[in-house]
Image (cartoon, rainbow, N blue to C red):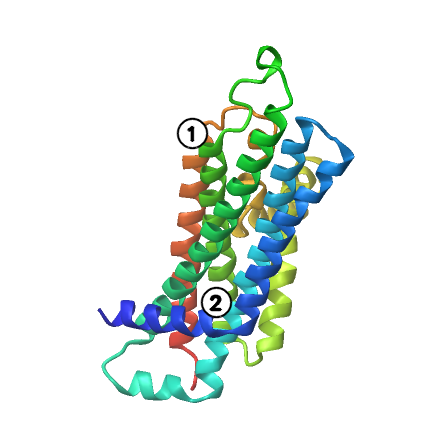
C-alpha cells in the first residue's frame, strides 16, 4: 500500500509538470502533422511513412521523457528534503525507490497510450482517405495491422521502463540532477549501439579486449531487441515470439536495475 501511495503521488507530480505537457503536445502535434505530407501524393506508401514517423516520435520523446522525468522527480524529493520526512515514517528506502519507479512507469504508460491512440487515429483517417480513391481490386488487404501498432507501443513502453530504471540507478548515487540526466542520455546512446560490442568481440584479437566486450555486451541492455518497427511498417505480421522475448528481456532489466538502485540508495547518506 505504501509503495502504491508513493507511485500515485509520483504520477500526480509528473502530470503537473510543464515538461510532461510540452512533450506530449509536441509528440501528438508531430504525429498529426504527418498528415500534411499527403500533398506529396505518396499513395499507399504514405501509410508506411506515417508509421515510421509516429514510431520515431514515440521512441525519441519517450526516451527523453523517461530520463528527464525520472531524474527530476527523484531529485525534487532530495532537494526539498521531503525524502527525509518520508523515510522518518515507516517507509523503507526500497519502498521509496520502487514507488518512484512504479509511478514513472504509470507516467510512461499514459504517454505511450496517448501516442498510440493518436497514431492509430491518423492511420485510420489516411487509410480511409486513400482507399476511397483506389479500386477495390487493387486495395492491399490488411496492410495496416492496428493490433501490431499496439503491440509495438507496449514493447516500447517496456523499453522506456528500462531507461527509467537505468536513470534511477544513476540518480541513486549521483549528487546532481544534471549529472544523472547527462550520464543517462549517454548510456541510452551506448545501449542503442550495444550490438557493436558483439561485433567487436568476434573480431578482437586480445583476450582481454574480448573479455571486456563480452562483459559489456551482457551488462548493458541491447536496445536493438526492441526495434520491431520495421515489421509493422512493412505490413508483415509481428511475431508474438519477438514481442514476448523483448518484453521478458526488458522486465528482467527492470528487476535487475531496480535491485541495484535500491542497494545503492540504501548506502547513500541523506
**Residue 258 vs residue 51, the one in the foreground:** 51
Mark carried by residue 168: 2
In this rendering, would 208 be left or right of 244? right
Q: Position of residue 169 (x, y in %)?
A: 48, 66
Q: Position of residue 83 (x, y in %)?
A: 38, 84
Determine which residue is flagged by label 1: 241
Q: Report if the CB atoms under discs 1 and 2 are less than 8 Å apart.
A: no
**Residue 135 vs residue 94, the one in the foreground:** 135
- The image shows residue 188, relative to residue 10, as above or below, that is above
Marks 1/2: CA distance? 29 Å
Secondary structure type for disc 2: helix
- The image shows residue 23, relative to residue 177, as above or below, that is above
**Residue 110 vs residue 177, the one in the foreground:** 110
Q: Quadrant of residue 180?
A: bottom right
Point out the tag, 1 or 2, that comes first from the N-terminus.
Answer: 2
Q: Residues within 10 Å of mark 1 (few under 14, many from 20)?
A: few
Residue visible at 52% across and 74% down?
A: 72
Q: Position of residue 252 (x, y in %)?
A: 40, 49
Residue visible at 30% across and 71% down?
A: 95
Query: Does the image show residue 184?
Result: yes
Q: Position of residue 260 (x, y in %)?
A: 42, 64
In this rendering, would 258 be left or right of 59? left
Q: Quadrant of residue 101?
A: bottom left
Amino acid at each position: 500500500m505504501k509503495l502504491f501511495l508513493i507511485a500515485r503521488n509520483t504520477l500526480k507530480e509528473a502530470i503537473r509538470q510543464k515538461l510532461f505537457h510540452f512533450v506530449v503536445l509536441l509528440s501528438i502535434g508531430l504525429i498529426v502533422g504527418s498528415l500534411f505530407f499527403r500533398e506529396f501524393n505518396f499513395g499507399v506508401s504514405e501509410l508506411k511513412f506515417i508509421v515510421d514517423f509516429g514510431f520515431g516520435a514515440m521512441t525519441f520523446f519517450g526516451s527523453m521523457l523517461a530520463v528527464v522525468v525520472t531524474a527530476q522527480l527523484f531529485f525534487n524529493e532530495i532537494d526539498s528534503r521531503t525524502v527525509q520526512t518520508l523515510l522518518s515514517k515507516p517507509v523503507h528506502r526500497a519502498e521509496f525507490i520502487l514507488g518512484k519507479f512504479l509511478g514513472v512507469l504509470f507516467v510512461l504508460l499514459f504517454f505511450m497510450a496517448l501516442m498510440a491512440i493518436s497514431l492509430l487515429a491518423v492511420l485510420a483517417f489516411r487509410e480511409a482517405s486513400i482507399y476511397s480513391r483506389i479500386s477495390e481490386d487493387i486495395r492491399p488487404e490488411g496492410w495496416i495491422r492496428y493490433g501490431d501498432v499496439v503491440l509495438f507501443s507496449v514493447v516500447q513502453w517496456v523499453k522506456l521502463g528500462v531507461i527509467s530504471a537505468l536513470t534511477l540507478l544513476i540518480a541513486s548515487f549521483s549528487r546532481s540532477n544534471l549529472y544523472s540526466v547527462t550520464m543517462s542520455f549517454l548510456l541510452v546512446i551506448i545501449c542503442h549501439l550495444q550490438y557493436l560490442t558483439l561485433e567487436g568481440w568476434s573480431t578482437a584479437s586480445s583476450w582481454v579486449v574480448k573479455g571486456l566486450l563480452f562483459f559489456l555486451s551482457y551488462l548493458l541492455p541491447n536496445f536493438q531487441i526492441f526495434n520491431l518497427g520495421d515489421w509493422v511498417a512493412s505490413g508483415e505480421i509481428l511475431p508474438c515470439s519477438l514481442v514476448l522475448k523483448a518484453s521478458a528481456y526488458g522486465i528482467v532489466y527492470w528487476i535487475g536495475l531496480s535491485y541495484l538502485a535500491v542497494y545503492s540508495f540504501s548506502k547513500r547518506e541523506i
